[in-house]
Image (cartoon, rainbow, N blue to C red):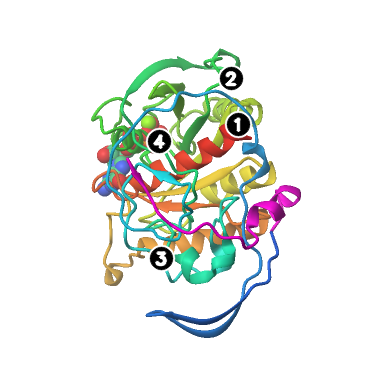
Amino acid sequence: MLHLNGTPTATPTASAAMAPLLHHHLHLHLHLYRISSPLFSISKLHISSITPFPQKIFNLSLAKKPTLTSQVSSVSTISSTTHLDFAIPEETHLEIPLDKLFVPPEVDISDGFEALSARVLKGSNIVLSSYAKDAQIKEAEFVKSSTRTEDCPSDGLPEFALVGRSNVGKSSLLNSIVRRKRLALTSKKPGKTQCINHFRINDSWHLVDLPGYGYAAAPKELRTDWAKFTKDYFLNRSSLVSVFLLIDGSIPAKKIDLEYASWLGQNEIPMTLIFTKCDKRKKKKNGGTRPEENVEDFQHLIREHFQAVPPWIMTSSVTNQGRDEMLLHMAQLRNYWLKH
Ligand SMILES: Nc1nc2c(ncn2[C@@H]2O[C@H](COP(=O)(O)OP(=O)(O)OP(=O)(O)O)[C@@H](O)[C@H]2O)c(=O)[nH]1
Ligand SMILES: [Mg+2]
């Protein structure tokens, strides 16, 4: 474990302002001077609309804290009290505009844009906070399959649910996250996962694999049932920290995914967009679009249904792209949820 050094600042932080403003854009007006980075030459910058965590993750539960070891790259902007146990990807997304970043609470934004940018997780819009600890997975085990929300485990552990179109790669992503080939069963044929499947991680939180939606070959009754039972789970599962909505990042946005994202937004269910299959890059001359373009377009299309910009991460279960970033994101959401 490595403790990062840094000077605690006496300047105002976002946290004080965040409490009364959850669920809303946080309008901050900072004036930064002489920002010098290879990608920016701005003399004065106006930041508005920084995104806090959604309100629904402010709950309480219990969890053990597993001890982990890993190296940390230098992130000097993190406060001196931060204990990180995970490798922080070195590359950052300097090109993401400030108003599209997901900024967790208690992140000191007074250090300015450059400092924030240095803490954006690679291939995402997520700023790393001091809550990103105990991120690594040591143990993963299947707990149970349920067909109703009432039958799901009642231990109150925080959980993240993977949902998305049939065949988008939910089960593959779960296996990639836990580094096990077949913990969740996958298939080329859509419709493999049929129940709410709980997997317990490090004895302290759950990953949940859900059946896919939009499986055209499924009978109509089955599709209606799917909508009913997963939506009931989203609306009533009190230990749900965030839904991870998986979107195929290798193709342009599909109507059904846009509708699903909008439904989650309208119902104020905390959501993270996980773009899958980002290893698949069709050539432009063959009519293909790049994952980066698909990610940008998708967000643009759902924008009106969200008060705040949802967090997003680009992933691939083939190359394990986004794996560490997902773990860090889940760790900071989880630890914040446990504390509040
Ligand atoms: N190239 C590539 N293929 C992937 C990736 N993730 C999944 N696949 C493939 O996509 C297919 C579907 O994967 P699953 O993980 O079973 O998809 P699912 O979303 O769980 O599907 P259902 O359970 O049927 O809803 C499989 O053939 C996977 O090998 C990825 O990141 N890159
Ligand atoms: Mg599956």
Q: Quadrant of residue 45?
A: bottom right
Q: Disc 4 residue type?
A: Asp
The residue labelled by disc 1 is 234
Q: Secondary structure at mark 3?
A: loop
Sequence-first tag of 3 and 1: 3
Residue at image coords 61%, 48%:
53
In the image, ligand 2 is in what quadrant? top left
> What range of the chain is rendered magenta?
1-25
Choose between 227 and 59: the one closer to the eye: 59
Specify whether tag 4 is near ligand 1 (CB below 8 Å): no
Frontmost of labels 4 and 2 is: 4
Sequence-first tag of 1 and 4: 4
Sequence-first tag of 1 and 2: 2
Residue at image coords 56%, 29%:
230
Magenta segment, principal secondary structure? Answer: loop
The residue labelled by disc 3 is 93
Q: Disc 2 residue type?
A: Thr
Q: Quadrant of residue 181?
A: top left
- In three-dimensional space, the C-alpha distance between marks 3 and 1, rounded to whole angstroms, equals 31 Å
The reply to whether dot 3 and dot 1 touch (C-beta < 8 Å) is no
Provide residue 87's location: percent of width, then percent of height: 31, 48
